[in-house]
Image (cartoon, rainbow, N blue to C red):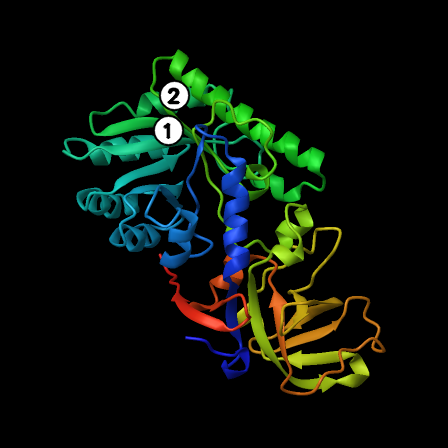
Amino acid sequence: MAIELTALETPALLLDEARMHANITRLRDRLPAPGPFLRPHVKTAKCLEVALAMSGGVPGPITVSTLREADRFAQAGFRDIVYAVGISPNKLTHAMALLASGVQLSVILDSVEAASALTAFMQGRPERLDVLIEIDTDGHRGGIAPAAPELLVVADALRSPSVRLQGVLTHAGESYNCRSTGALEAMAEQERAGAVLAAQRLRAAGYPAPVVSIGSTPTALTARDLSGVTEVRAGVFVFFDLVMAGVGVCTPHDIALSVLTSVIGHQRDKGVTLCDAGWMALSRDRGTASQPVDQGYGLVCDAQGRVLPDFIVTAVNQEHGSIAHRNGDPGRYLDVPVGTMLRILPNHACATGAQHEGYQVLGQDGTVTARWPRFGGW
């Protein structure tokens, strides 16, 4: 299979396979042997072929953000799965079905209420469910502060023959707001130290905590010390995106994902070129708006993937995108014929990928060599 880009209908989601593999190798090479292992987060890709590439070609430990992901990857042979969203009682029956299918499933929680609901549900069941307590190391989202008394209260609420406390898990989401290597290194150490402290407190109080799980793409790529950590979770590193470029952990050249689009018209008096990639193809994610360089709804490249400096998608409707120079000068207008193919680099690879049913995989010569399906839903 070798299809020229010109044979594709647009918009289409493109995946540069060589860049993807380079991104995977970069992170794997950073993890010291026999130190923490990589438990890739498959929520970004939602694709079996990509998950296998992230796992070294064979099913390995993964992280998921939906139980539907757990189902799909379990069917493909991935049996060691962390569901890294706080568990709610209405999902426990689904979790039991995964356990019954032979999956080694771990769930996370961060409150006595959730722990009590889980132990009540599990009472008298023959299955044993693994649990990680979510730790908040940066004030970004959910979790218990590493030194909070509540940590031990939650651990005590998990005492049950059908529940196995495995340790702690954290995610340094605040790393997305870092703007320098020094800040990223400091955030990575804050993440590591907080998770390790929480695990040490559990052990000192007599609770098991063999697992210390940390993870975010920025901290995984900048951490200088991973002592005490048993696994690293990251997901967007496989593709990268403009937010990651704005954080400083990649460049636009490293971004493996793009949306192929066609020019469909012009508004020359406004300095606008219209394309057929609107928010249904690109998403409405504006993650770079708070960064020093605002990339609008995506950075524009030519059909070969070469960045067209300072041309961005400035506005989107459902099926229309407006391309203009970032300074708004109508005189600096992308004057290309109708039918010209362009590529748009995404702000957020997860959000853009979610708009599409599959990847058109690009080989070294820039032709499409395969189509890899992806899935969505919960």
Judging by the rendered image, the residue that carries numbered circle 2 is: 153
155 left or right, relative to 182: left
**The one of 326 and 87 positioned closer to us in this rendering:** 326
Query: Within 10 angstroms of label 2, few (less than 14), some, or many (20 or more) residues?
Result: few
**The one of 242 and 227 positioned closer to us in this rendering:** 227
Residue 258 at x, y percent in the picture: 57, 66
Say whether marks 1 and 2 touch (CB < 8 Å).
yes
Query: Within 10 angstroms of label 1, few (less than 14), some, or many (20 or more) residues?
Result: some
Residue 47 visible in image: no
Q: Please name the amino acid that badge 1 sits on.
A: Val
Q: Quadrant of the C terminus?
A: bottom left
**The one of 64 and 252 positioned closer to us in this rendering:** 252
Q: Please name the amino acid that badge 2 sits on.
A: Val
345 left or right, relative to 99: right
Q: Secondary structure at mark 1?
A: helix
Above or below, comparing residue 309 to residue 172 in the picture: below
Q: Secondary structure at mark 2?
A: helix
Residue 194 at x, y percent in the picture: 53, 25
